Image (cartoon, coloured by chain):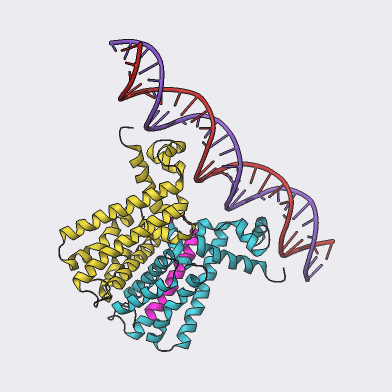
Chain colours: A yellow, B cyan, C red, D purple
Amino acid sequence: MTTNSREAILAAATLSAQAHGYLGMNFRDLAAEVGIKAASIYHHFPSKAELGAAVGRRYWEDAAVVLEAISDEAPDPVEALRRYPATFRLALQSGNRICLFSFMAAEFDDLPDVVKTEVLAFADVNVAWLTRHVSAAGLAPAGDSEARARAIYAAIAGAQLVARSRSDVSVYDALIDGYRAAGLLPG
Amino acid sequence: MTTNSREAILAAATLSAQAHGYLGMNFRDLAAEVGIKAASIYHHFPSKAELGAAVGRRYWEDAAVVLEAISDEAPDPVEALRRYPATFRLALQSGNRICLFSFMAAEFDDLPDVVKTEVLAFADVNVAWLTRHVSAAGLAPAGDSEARARAIYAAIAGAQLVARSRSDVSVYDALIDGYRAAGLLPG
DNA sequence: AAAAACCTAACGATCGTTAGATAGGGCTTG
DNA sequence: CAAGCCCTATCTAACGATCGTTAGGTTTTT
C-alpha cells in the first residue's frame, strides 16, 4: 500500500470500536476494511489488547487537540462550552457511532487493563477541559467547577447512548437543548 | 429443581446482561449459574434472541411496578423525583452492574430486533413516568415536561456509565448531586 | 404411560492467535 | 555495478477455544 497500514488499521479499529465495542471488534473484518488479511495486523500490533490500547490512546490524544482548538477559536469560555457538545455529534451523524468512552465504559469490567487505562484517560482529558472552562465561565459556585464538569460530561455520554438507541441525531440535539434549558449547560 | 428454572434463567440472564451486555452473555455460563446444562435452556427459550427479549420485557415490567410504588409512597411529585435516581443505584452497588438499557443502548445496532423493541420500551416507561412527575412538580415550563424528562433519563444513564468505569458507586451519587446543583433534578 | 425437564455429544461458525512461506525494496559488499 | 542479504510487509493455513444451536437419549414428575 502507498499509505501507512498502521494508520489505516487504527482508523478502521476506531470506527469499529465506536460501532460494536471492544468485544464486537474483530480482526477479520478490520483487515478486510484495510485491504489486508487478519494475520497481517500482528505485524503492526502484538495483540487485540494492545491494538485496543493504541486506539484508545490515539483517541484521547486527538480529543485533546480538538479541545484546545475550540479554546483557541472561542476565547470566551461560555462560547467554548456552547461548542463542546458538537464534538460528540459527528460520530452519531456518520454511522450512528458513539464516543469510544461511552461504549467502553459499559464494557469496562471485561476490558484488558491496558485498554482501561486509555479509556479513563479520555474521560480525564474531557473533565479537565470542562473544569477549566466551567470555572472561567463562572457557571458553577466556587469549588464546584469540577463537580459541574463531571456532571456535564456524564450527561453528554448519556445523551449519545439514548440517541444511538433511536438511531437519530436529532434526539441528541434535543437532549443537549434540554440540558441547556435546565441550566446544566450554558444556554 | 424445586424452584422454577425458567425464572432462575431469567434472573441469571438479567444479571449477566447488566454486567457483560447481550454480546457478552453466553449460555454455558448462564446454565452453570442456574445449575443446569446449556442445552437445557432451549427447553425454556427457543433462542438467545428470545431469551434476551424475555429478559428485556421482564425488566421494564418490573421497572413499571417499582416506579408506581414510588408514586404511591411519595404522593408529592418532587419527592418522587428525588427518589428516582436511587432505583439505578442498586445494580452499581451490587456487582458494578448497570441498567440493562444503558448497556444495550450501546450495543443497539448489533441487537436482534425482538430485543431492540423491549429495550426501547424500558426507556419509554421511564420517560413516561418522569414526564408525569416533572409536569406535576412544575419542574419545567409548560410544554417542556417531556423534554426535561428525557434529559433527566439520559443524564442518569450517563451517570451510571461513568460510575461503572470508576467501579465506584459514590461517583454515581456525586453526579446525581451535580445534576441537582445544576437544576436538572429537584434539589 | 405420557409429558416435562434435563442430559450427552456433537456440529458448524467464529474468534484471537501462531507458524512458516513469499515477495520486494534497500543496504552492504566484493 | 552487480550480487548477495536482510528487513518489512504481507500471505496461506491452521490451531485451540468458544459460541449458539441441534439431535437424540435419559431422568423426573404427574
From the viewer's side, name the closer residue of B43 and C2. Answer: B43
The number of numbered badges drawn on the structure is 0
Q: Which residue of the protein is positioned furthest toward the bottom in this rendering?
A: B75
The quadrant of the image that shows the C terminus of chain A is bottom left
* Above or below for B51 versus B87: above
Asked whether residue B54 is in view, the answer is no
User: Looking at the picture, does residue A144 appear above or below residue A55?
Assistant: below
Q: Is residue A149 left or right of residue A18?
A: left
Q: Is residue B164 above or below residue C8?
A: below
Residue A180: in magenta span: no
User: Image quarter for residue B147?
Assistant: bottom left
Q: Observer-nearest residue: B187 or B131?
A: B187
Residue B151, located in which quarter of the rendered image? bottom left
Q: Which residue lies at the image location 34% right of the left edge and 65% below the top edge?
A: A159
Image coordinates of residue D1 in percent, x first then y, are 28, 10
Q: Which of the pair A19/A148 is nearer the observer?
A: A148
Q: Horizontal placement of D30 versus A51: left or right?
A: right
Asked if residue B129 lies in the magenta stretch, the reply is yes
Majority secondary structure of the magenta segment? helix
Q: Residue A45 at x, y = what percent? A: 41, 42
Does B157 appear above or below A54?
below
Q: x and y percent of residue C13 in the render?
A: 55, 43
Residue B161: which quarter of the image?
A: bottom left
**Residue B165 at x, y percent in the picture:** 42, 63
> Can residue B62 be seen from the camera position used here?
yes
Magenta span of residues: B109-132
For the N terminus of chain A, give its image quadrant.
top left
